[in-house]
Amino acid sequence: MKTVIITGTGAGIGFELARIFSEKNYKVISLSRSSNIVELGLENINHVSFNITNDNDQLELVNYCKKNKIEIDFLINNAGLLINKTFDEITVNDFKKIYDVNLFGIVNLIKNLFGFFSSNAHIINISSIGGLIGSSKFKGLTAYSSSKGALNILTEVLAEEYKDTQLSFNSLCLGSVQTKMLEKAFPGYQAEVSPTEMAEYIYNFSVNGKKLFNGKVIPISKSNP
């Protein structure tokens, strides 16, 4: 049984990803502050309470992997933070909060888990179409979109550094998905894609994408944005 670690499984895309992987007979390590996923009662899901910005939580995860002799086949960095404020309203502290979740927390997680990856593991960073150069932008997302742009570059450089291994790193730049995070940031906005639909796409890409992609930043959006 192959193992996938998914961050941000409390709701939305991450929740649906954990469910889909479990139903497809993968061992799922669910990382989130919320334990909502446990209520599904799926036997393949092992939930670990986790805040990606907390160093102690990161250390506890490493200890969990050591204790349980975990070998990671897929890591999906799905957790994210979005604050919708115009540039004159947003603070440097807001920027730091967003970058801590969307970039530095992911850097820390990948570094901490490196010794547990299988020889041909696939690391998927969930980014945003707003972090893609040349795409249309939403106002109010200077911090969020720039953090996702940095995540995309991180993905490309990691693939370059480890190109002599069988590890794969890819970034999926999602368009709008009807999640609670979107609803909170943009009240009344209706996305065309549901969390389940996007999770199904990410599942298929995670399992099959590494055959054709490595170090790629891929837009997953019908529109621009």
Image (cartoon, rainbow, N blue to C red):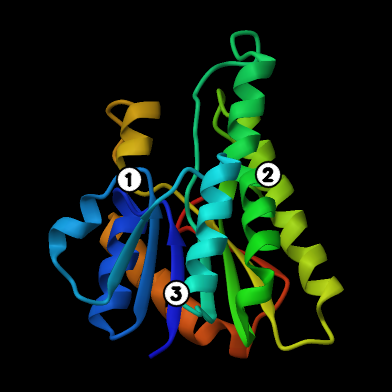
Determine the residue located farthest toward the front in the rendered image.
67
Find residue 21 and report its horizontal and vertical position in percent: 32, 76
Nearest-to-viewer mark from 3 and 1: 3
Q: Residue at x 28, y 62 (%)?
A: 16
CA separation in Å, label 1 and label 2 = 28 Å
Quadrant of the rendered image containing residue 143: top right
Residue at label 3? Answer: 4
Q: How many marks?
A: 3
CA separation in Å, label 3 and label 2 = 21 Å
Judge left or right: residue 102 versus residue 186. Answer: right
Taking 209 as reference, is 211 above or below it? below
Q: Residue at x 29, y 48 (%)?
A: 11
Judge left or right: residue 166 versus residue 6. Answer: right
| Proximity of marks 1 and 2: CB atoms separated by less than 8 Å | no
| Proximity of marks 3 and 1: CB atoms separated by less than 8 Å | no
Evaluate whether residue 223 shows in this view.
yes
> Which sits in the foreground, 219 or 85?
85
Q: Quadrant of the N terminus?
A: bottom left
Residue at label 1? Answer: 191
